[in-house]
Amino acid sequence: MDVFFIVTAESLAVANVDCKCGVVIRNLSRVLRSRYTCANRESNQMIDAILSILSGGLAGAALVWLLRSWISERLQQSIRHEYSQKLETHKAELNTRIQAIEHENQLYQLRTSLFFDHQRNAFAGLLAKIAEVNQKWIDEEFQSEEGFTGPVPYDAYKELRKRYYEHQLFLDSACLAAMELLFEFYTDSFPFDDGSASEPIPRDLKAAYAGVEYLQPRIAELFQQKIGVIDNSRAAHEVALLGGIRLLNHYHFEEVALPAKGSLELTHRDRPADAVVKAEEHLGELTAKLKELCLYLRRDGGVFHEASTKALRYLSILESE
């Protein structure tokens, strides 16, 4: 009896222990299941959040791309429209300018053609008249034994002067300088009346004709250069040298030490070619003296306007080379 009781008691104790263990196990299983359920729920929520973020990011990126494409397209259309308007405006302005330029070019060509025709006729007429005057001078006033016996025929000289004034408008500074220098040599053949003698004093006819003879081919060459037949400015240079050194030996102005002395002084033995060589060898001194003369004549109130004009023309030719 006692043994059975002990066994039963032990069995009960074991059973009680098993029962408690079962409860503990059940409770633990319930806790674990609950925690697993919470963890699973949290995991699902996290996954849902990540998926939501991912889906939202993709949608946002797509929306941004669509907005960017739309804005870009709108800007391109706006820029194309603006540039198209500006291009049309520019084309219209350009066409207007082209038409104006074409019109001006046509007028310029017309004026140039007319001017060229007049200039060519002027050059041809002057050269022919110079040759006619020189030939008449030889025919009427030249003797084979005595040389020239009289000045250039005055009527022929006046006709040349008239022809010169008719065409003066079409002559530039170099041509004017050459023609005026030619007339100086012609007038050097006329007798000089200083009021001290009963009759005019004869001049050096040979020297006068030598100057005309020197200038005639150079004037022809200068005219040819002006119409493009030749490309050589030597004729104008020689005209300026001869005219410049003659000018410095012609006037008497003590304030600027004229007439020239020393290297620029001319004598009766100097022919035109000799004078040109002397002037070219002392070109710097020649131009400096011409400038000094211009300044002096300018201070004098323009009384010697002709001399000042000649000096400025010679300087313009000499300093342009």
Image (tube, rainbow, N blue to C red):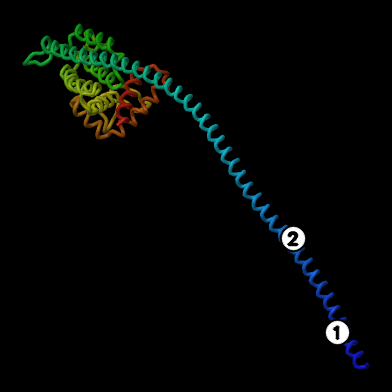
Q: Element type at marker 2?
A: helix
Sequence-wise, which precedes: disc 1 or disc 2? Answer: 1
* Numbered badge on residue 14: 1
- Tell me what residue is drawn at x 77 percent, y 67 percent: 33
Percent coordinates x, y for residue 88 in the rendering: 47, 25
Image quadrant holding the C terminus, namely top left
Residue that label 2 marks: 41
Tally of marks: 2
Image quadrant holding the N terminus, namely bottom right
Tell me the quarter of the picture where residue 304 sits. top left
Pick whichever, 215 or 210, lies toward us: 215
Residue type pointed to by label 2: Arg
Pick whichever, 257 or 197, lies toward us: 257
Determine whether, in the image, residue 154 is placed left or right of residue 46: left
Q: Is residue 59 above or below residue 164?
A: below
Percent coordinates x, y for residue 163 in the rendering: 24, 10
